[in-house]
Image (spheres, rainbow, N blue to C red):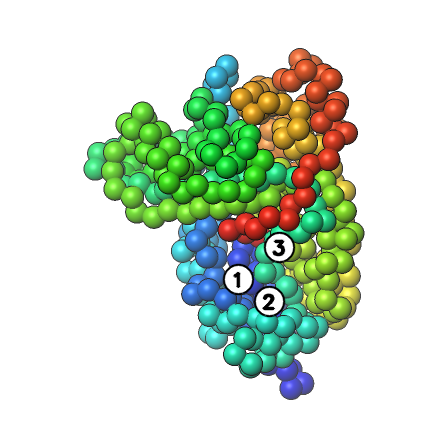
Amino acid sequence: MNGRDCDIAIVGGGLSGGLIALALARHRPDLSVRLIESGGAPGGNHRWSWFATDLDAAGQELMSRFRKTEWDDGYEIRFPNLSRNLDAGYRSLTSEDFAATLARELDDGAILTGRDASVVEAKSVTFTDGTTLTAHKVIDCRGYTSTADLNGGWQVFMGRHVRTAEPHGFTRPIIMDATVDQVAPSGNGGAYRFVYVLPLGSHDVFVEDTYYADRPELDRSALSGRIDQYCHQAGIAGEPVSFETGVLPVITGGDFAAFQAAHRTPGVAVAGGRGGFVHPLTSYTLPIAVEVALAVAEDADLPGEQLAAKLEAHARKVWKSMGFYRALGRMLFNGAPPAIRYRIFERFYGLPEPLVERFYAGKSTLMDRLRVLTGKPPIPIHRGISALLSTSPRLNAAHSKDNS
């Protein structure tokens, strides 16, 4: 390694950093990799989910290494005027299983935990304790950072894993249950609210209360109380096993060139949310993270400067391809009063299932986009047009969880 500690140093052990490390281990085992995580284990306290149709064969092979919960009998959605079962399989991965797989698949000593990076440069990472790790290439995957360069709203949520004494009776995921009260907790302004339910086993269920909110405040007491209420109404009685909370950006526009410039360090490749590799509306980012991880493994021999430039160019391509979803976000936040924002998703879920699958994968066709925007509008036309032309507030507020 010509005096370097490793070939590739990955700073940030979240979804993006961990998948890059795994892809390198699978496709380039000749390279030495260090995955640097500031916390006690890669992945933090998260649950990542995706649809089986989101990944191509290569992506499915990469994700096959992880122990995960799988549902092959489809999923449900529930709205005031629409309930539907859709056929796509669904997958969910916990951070514990994520960390366990990385520990098994990566070389001994490849994962460095409890190491907080203070300076990240093209050939080295300096930690807060003053020590330095040198590398031929450095990839920064430390997650999305709040910025005034982008605009939008927030996805605020609390999830609880409940273990029930008796079988809970749920057999398939409920991706959106928007039949719940649409009033947001105090401090969030307006919001579209839904509950997300994952039956993890006959006696285990994950219930998440979620808001597409104008502001990023997370009222733990209020959300916990609403989960209590939902569980009571759904007949879910048991003890909490674990919980997670989060505040994620819902990006509706902004100056992406300025965002990239603010996160650029010469010669350092940037991936994950920090690099702009996100689905701006849904937060289903795993398919993009898998795609980027495989691309990095394929280009692992590039010098750091070239890899950095290639990932920046790819991020610009992703940003351009996601313009339709940012526009829908503006319609959601700026086009509808909070109490009827659910109508936008309600109408969307009444469309053909292949369109819904491509939407979540971030691969909507031109005909898909026309289909979403035409027909009976879920909000008055003049409000929709005004929203499409509007600008949302800047995303420069603090947030408590990244999904990079």
Instruction: Answer above or below: position of 124 versus 257.
Output: below
Amino acid type, label 2: Ile
Q: Where is residue 391 in the image (x, y as percent from the top left)?
A: 73, 35
Instruction: Answer above or below: position of 251 versus 305.
Output: above
Could you tell me if the residues under marks 3 and 2 are in contact, i.e. CB atoms within 8 Å? no
In the picture, the disc for residue 10 is 2
The secondary element bearing badge 3 is classed as loop
User: For this view, does 199 lie left or right of residue 72?
Assistant: left
Amino acid type, label 1: Gly
Calculate the distance from the C-alpha at mark 3 to the C-alpha at mark 2.
17 Å
Instruction: Let me know if residue 243 appears in the view.
Output: yes
Q: How crowded is mark 1: few (under 14 residues within 10 Å), some or many (20 or more)?
A: many
Q: Name the quadrant containing residue 223.
A: top left
Location of mark 1 (residue): 13
Calculate the distance from the C-alpha at mark 1 to the C-alpha at mark 3.
15 Å
User: For this view, does 292 lie left or right of residue 88?
Assistant: right
The secondary element bearing badge 1 is classed as loop
The foreground one among 371 and 189 is 189
Could you tell me if the residues under marks 2 and 1 are in contact, i.e. CB atoms within 8 Å? yes
Which is closer to the viewer, label 1 or label 3? 3
Q: At 58% from the left edge and 35% from the top edge, which residue is drawn?
A: 214
Q: Earlier in the sequence, mark 1 or mark 3?
A: 1
Q: Where is residue 274 in the image (x, y as percent from the top left)?
A: 64, 55
Instruction: Let me know if residue 207 appears in the view.
Output: no
Q: At 59% from the left edge and 56% from the top edge, which residue is drawn?
A: 143
Q: Which of marks 3 and 2 is nearer the N terminus?
A: 2
Which is closer to the viewer, label 3 or label 2? 3
Location of mark 3 (residue): 145
User: For this view, does 140 lie left or right of residue 15?
Assistant: right
Calculate the distance from the C-alpha at mark 2 to the C-alpha at mark 1.
8 Å
The secondary element bearing badge 2 is classed as strand
Q: Name the quadrant containing residue 340.
A: top right
